[in-house]
Amino acid sequence: MKEYQTITEISGPLVFAEVDEPIGYDEIVEIETPGGETKRGQVLESSEGLVAIQVFEGTDGIDRASSVRFLGETMKMPVTEDLLGRVLDGSGNPIDGGPNIVPDERRDIVGAAINPYSREYPEEFIQTGVSAIDGMNTLVRGQKLPIFSGSGLPHNELALQIARQATVPEEDDASEGDGGSEFAVIFGAMGITAEEANEFMEDFERTGALERSVVFMNLADDPAVERTVTPRLALTTAEYLAFDKGYHVLVILTDMTNYCEALREIGAAREEVPGRRGYPGYMYTDLAQLYERAGRIEGRDGSVTQIPILTMPGDDDTHPIPDLTGYITEGQIYVDRDLESQGVEPPIYVLPSLSRLMDDGIGEGLTRGDHADVSDQLYAAYAEGEDLRDLVNIVGREALSERDNRFLDFAERFEDEFVNQGYETDRSIEETLGIGWELLSTLPAEELHRIDEEFIAEYYLEDETEAAAVEAE
Amino acid sequence: MSQATATEDVREDGVIRSVSGPVVTATGLNARMNDVVYVGEEGLMGEVIEIEGDVTTIQVYEETSDVAPGEPVENTGAPLSVDLGPGMLYSIYDGVQRPLDELERRMNSAFLDRGVDAPGIDLEKTWEFTPTVEEGDEVAPGDVVGEVPETESITHRVMVPPDYEGGEVVAVEEGSFTVEETVVELDSGEAVTMHQEWPVREARPALDKKTPRTPLVSGQRILDGLFPIAKGGTAAIPGPFGSGKTVTQHSLAKWADADIVVYVGCGERGNEMTEVIEDFPELEDPQTGKPLMARTCLIANTSNMPVAARESCIYTGITIAEYFRDMGYDVALMADSTSRWAEAMREISSRLEEMPGEEGYPAYLSARLAEFYERAGRFDLINGDEGSISVIGAVSPPGGDFSEPVTQNTLRIVKTFWALDADLAERRHFPAINWNESYSLYRTQLDPWYREEVAEDYPEIRQWGIDVLDEESELQEIVQLVGKDALPEDQQLTLEVARYLREAWLQQNAFHDVDTYCEPTKTYRMLQAIKTFNDEAFDALDAGVPVEEIQDIDAAPRLNRMGTAEEYEEFIGELESDLTEQLRELY
């Protein structure tokens, strides 16, 4: 391993150094400052005689006399089952004071793409216990379903609730006791505040979830460039646990917005031609390389399910970060400011939310035969009620027909009873659908034309007494 | 240079000078533009995209981590080509036509490794060849010399390659052969095998383009009914995420009445491709009753696979489509999504530090798009036959804004526009195609077909439907201000009719066994039933019946069940007479 003291330029997170041997693209670099500090970086561009290095821990303290060592390999993540229960920093070093990690293997963090031919289509229903998700935007094992949120909204509470409650119902019965259907949680934090980090850690400790978790922490005051590595470390660990060790892994990445900011910072420092709003043109590819590392593989037991969280700048979902994310992920869950201020917990706005893998994960044998129809009908009815709200503001309730008034009432009750359940309530899918039917029964049966007649016969609550009886139960 | 002719070792023709992501420069490489080269010790496949002095710029189709300057580069001296021959149907390829199942076997891993080659068609497998020419026959380029039963539904026609001279047949074989064995010899010394190679960036020759006059029937009511595409036509489906581009593309791939379907998943989700791989072999082609996969060729270059291969996958797809067209088939190509392709161009362009055009896209974006869509059409083939390629491209405009460059440049070329609408998708109106914004310029030229095959008055009744929907959107603006009850009764009734048009006719459930495919006659009959309701209802209104009573008749909600009705003729017939009877009873 050769050492160079040939730095020619330092600019933002980038260091340029002259070399006299060929250096591999993406290779890992160690830079030792005169102060004795060692920083790590990665080769961004390698040409004969000159390399550009992106330094993870920030370039402060580096001068032209600093020495540069090329390690001759790309970035690796030491993986082992013993990582469960550990807390690591954004570069993968333990910060919980525990013992050193003895890896079984060191894996390249870039991770090769899963061959689409080798994938298994995800269709196992995950019960999150949250009605707005289970009933309307069902999550399945191996899916990537981001939470689109905004600053100051309770997306963390929602993510924690999902992490706490997520189970796969059928397997609960089959493998009772061994906890086989519980998820191992990988938590990748990128640029979140220490306070938010504490919130997560406390919840993990309170619920005992930490033993089946691996936590990667890159806090707001940690170097921004490190954020480009953190999710890759997390996902490499997730893939190892899922596809080599058979765990069902739930990966929570927060906050993707900070990750993208870091990408932009590097792009700007490299004087690249920027794409929309200054973000690099390759951001789609870059994000895809993270999000696509979810799924199931034919013949392997485990799965990787991803819940990335992103805060939309200005609550604008046409901003490049949510926009590109939405094009890659299999749906999205919107956390909404208006619902939040109405006190709805969790404030999930179901209309723009979507789970693309829902159709194959629900129905007879998976959840219940009427699930798809009920969810469709709830959507349509709620959308109609929402439309009428605008009209009510202008003409008042009295000017509306009885039919319209019923839809308005439905929309109100849908938010209050179906969506608003609190962060500690864990509803089974039966309960969720039951509430759905209770609400739909406030509408005339002939309005429910999205539902198969046979389900209406079975579940529709004909009159008030029947409805009351169900409520009493 | 195709996958079938690849060799093992990397010969040192040139040396790598620099590496930056998928873009590598090399010196000493005496290459031509678009030649395929093998880069580095591992022999990663790449293509020459720029030559400046002694420095050659290469886009590499695989991940370049750990590749270093000084490593060798081999020039194959041939442009990126595909292997054409029997065995492409039932296949799933990556962007440079490597079969993904074969890659899994060769890499022995579920993850895509680097530097592994696999021929696009199986070179060892034997096929039953039956000649259609005899010794002494004169054959020209493009002529069919024999047939191979490739799948249950498709006969593969073996042709004289278009770059041959042709001549008199001097020897003909019959029986089992591999694709590389000679089956027909010509007096020009040329030997015809079942295997052809063709450079992907070059259109296969055809004589002439003709005006397409047959629709590509899709089984989707809003498409067949309002915005048809012709066999040989082009269509674009732009829409924000979650508006149902992929579901629409999948429905088309499943139900379109093309002979061959080439589905290009360009930079999209891995799980979606898996869904196609798992579903298609089990689904039946409604025309032939054979598995859908028997007429399908898939190209999957998902979003996390290398970006340069994403750029090439569109060309790989269209070249395969042209090859089947040359056999005289009607081919439909779905590209999902062309925006990812354009972004791949942008990414490579920006690594080359080219001067950007609009929104960072290269200035040649519109030329490339036009070039691609122009490879669609209804053609007179060089062998005197006819064949067509219909191209349906999904577009993913950032933020759902149709004014962005890819959508705009696409709209300048394509003749059918299916605008997906997030609002419709939110209220679960699927397919979420906006009927006010969409258009098809093929309507008039397809009308004779509709009159002949579906119903003589089809164009008129369709126009009636369009008028009602137009009127509705105007009335809706007023309703937003004053409420529905403030409208005069006839307008309220129009709104009611429009609601049935939207909910019973335009909406279609892609996940319902019956509703997922709707033949043109059923599309017509459903529309007719709604018109019956309309006509009878207005008669009743004229006779003084209040609009509430008309709306409340028992039979009306049954209009919504027409789509899912199995025996639709019976169901609709009965419904129409019930509607008429109940409405006439009112006065």
Image (tube, helix red, strand yellow):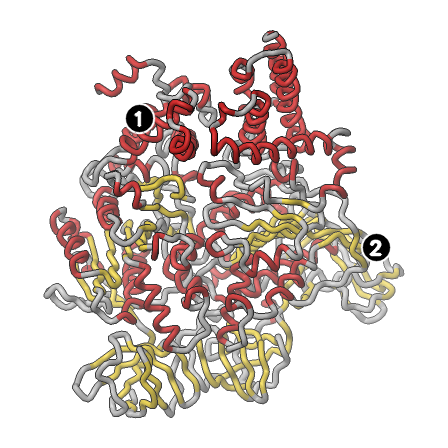
**Label 2 belongs to which residue?**
B384
The reply to whether residue B109 is in sight is no
Can you tell which of label 1 and label 2 is closer to the viewer? Answer: 1
**Label 1 belongs to which residue?**
A434
Between B584 and B203, the one nearer to me in the picture: B584
For the point 44% across and 25% down, which residue is it? A451
> In the image, residue B235 lies at what x, y percent?
64, 50
Q: Residues within 10 Å of mark 2 (few under 14, many from 20)?
A: some
The reply to whether residue B35 is in sight is yes
Disc 1 marks a residue whose amino acid type is Gly
> In the image, residue A349 lies at what x, y percent?
34, 41
Disc 2 marks a residue whose amino acid type is Gly
- Please give the chain letter of the residue carrying mark 1: A
**Count of marks, rendered view:** 2
* Quadrant in which the C terminus of chain A is drawn: top left
For the point 73% across and 51% down, which residue is it? B388
Residue B111, located in which quarter of the rendered image?
bottom left
For the point 28% across and 61% down, which residue is it? A234
For the point 84% across and 70% down, which residue is it? B188
